[in-house]
Amino acid sequence: MYWNRRSILRVISSGASLLPLRAADMIIRSMRPEDFEMPLDGFSTWITPVGRFFVRTHVYTPNVDAASWQLRVEGEVTSPLSLGLADLRALPRAEFVSVLECAGNGRGFYDPAVAGLQWRYGSVGNARWAGVRLIDVLKKAGYSASAREVLFNGADVPIGAMPDFVRAIPLAKAVHPDTLLAYEMNGQPLTPSHGFPIRVIVPGWAGDNWVKWLTNIEVRDKEFDGFFMKTAYRHPVRSIAPGATVDPADMTPVTLLRPKSVIVSPVERQSLTESATTIRGAAWSGESPVKRVEVSVDSGRKWRPAKLGGEQAKYGWRLWEADWVPPARGSYVIMSRATDEAGDTQPLVQDWNPSGYLWNVVPQVRVEVGNSASLPAEVAASVPELPPTVKTTCIGCHAEDMIAGQRLSRVQWERELDKMTRWGAPVAPDNRETIIEFLLSHFGPRH
Ligand SMILES: Nc1nc2c(c(=O)[nH]1)N[C@H]1C(S)=C(S)[C@@H](COP(=O)(O)O)O[C@H]1N2
Ligand SMILES: [Mo]
């Protein structure tokens, strides 16, 4: 059976309080593992409340016992450490607001389609993080001159034979005073979904570096080559044609976020009157703050500056708005474009990334002014019941919605199925073709 969005009422335990996850607050991309997207209206507030903050987890959320939790710090250090929560809290506190964005945010817009969760706008949020500086912990352990990078592992365990989620950042970023081991999000202890009791904060860098449920830190003298470093989260060193495959030697790790803006209001296909309206949105970038946001209401011919909101922080997002009086009735395309202090700006055409990372093309919203004729509503895709072979193969580890959100070619589905088989999915050789046929007929390419 498919999840009926309205019927979902999930309980997330966060310390003593129980927070129901309301379907209206989040777009459920996958219930198991937990992959929740913030709907567009979430960009209306400067700070994203925890209950509306996106969740991206490769595996099942571990329940970590705070009393017995220990953080091990080892590798290229003079004195390996084992720290409890009280030891960490005894170190100086650091606190700031930062955007956290998944590298895959916007993957659903790539054409041709790319395998993976079909995030649109909202696998990003802006929160106030508090914790201790990683450098203070590294100094306590006495990191050696041989140190090159710092590797993080969390309490989550892989599903089947999937590789463990382990990530490394270069030493220069690790020792930066803004790289934190956080225990708080928006003034409250982290919730289990967001990494309780401790997660890494790597401001300006994509979310895959922000390891949750941290248990192990290893200072290394050479590059870690696990799956989530060597194969995943990479970007082509030069721009390539959409759909082209890239030689792994020509891929480099995704690090910095790039300038990006979203339009919150009006929304796609909204009907407006000819009176004044306000175009609103949010914008952010990586380590270089947003300098300006420009808006176009004529399909990108003319641009004018939007007014930036007063609330700001080095790594935070900026709300923006621009007043607009439509000159006449008609159909208009509104666009927005963010530029950071370093001069980088949003492109009109997306650079191809084979895994669908770093989407930041100028957003477009078409509106109808003074047109009372109602437009055809988007017809919801009807999702078929999965046949038993597909169920036993795929649904052991993750829910149906993770499959149904994707539109892939035969080669892509074969690659996904073979990867899952390597990771432990029970695919009887006789069933492989049946499964591929089913996936292709229901979840084949868009065109
Ligand atoms: N241990 C662990 N940390 C993790 C992940 C994970 O699967 N396991 N997912 C990462 C990814 S890809 C992202 S985008 C962020 C999402 O953080 P959030 O769920 O708090 O929004 O967590 C990162 N940290
Ligand atoms: Mo991510």
Image (spheres, rainbow, N blue to C red):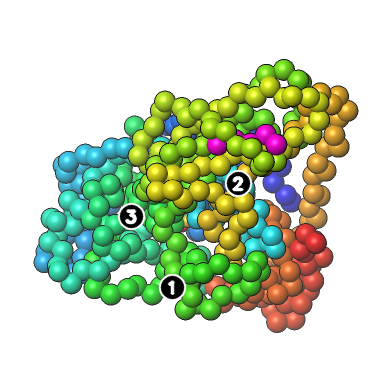
Q: Is residue 55 visible?
A: no
Mark 1, secondary structure of its residue: helix
Which amino acid, by three-letter code, is at mark 1?
Lys
**Mark 2 against mark 3, which lies toward the viewer?**
2
- The magenta-colored residue range is 294-298
From the top left corner, tell me how far across and down residue 415 is, in percent. Answer: 64, 74
From the top left corner, tell me how far across and down residue 444 is, in percent. Answer: 77, 64
Mark 2, secondary structure of its residue: loop
Residue ID at (70%, 63%): 112
- The residue tagged 1 is 230
Which amino acid, by three-letter code, is at mark 3?
Leu
Mark 3 sits near ligand 1, with its Cβ under 8 Å away: yes
Disc 2/disc 3 C-alpha distance (Å): 35 Å
Which amino acid, by three-letter code, is at mark 2?
Val
Disc 3/disc 1 C-alpha distance (Å): 21 Å
**Badge number at residue 214:** 3
- The residue tagged 2 is 362
Residue ID at (33%, 62%): 169
Q: Nearer the viewer, residue 384 or 105?
A: 105
Q: Is residue 311 left or right of residue 111?
A: left
**Mark 3 against mark 1, which lies toward the viewer?**
1
Q: Is residue 146 left or right of residue 178?
A: left
**Mark 1 against mark 2, which lies toward the viewer?**
2
Q: Is residue 165 above or below residue 68?
A: below
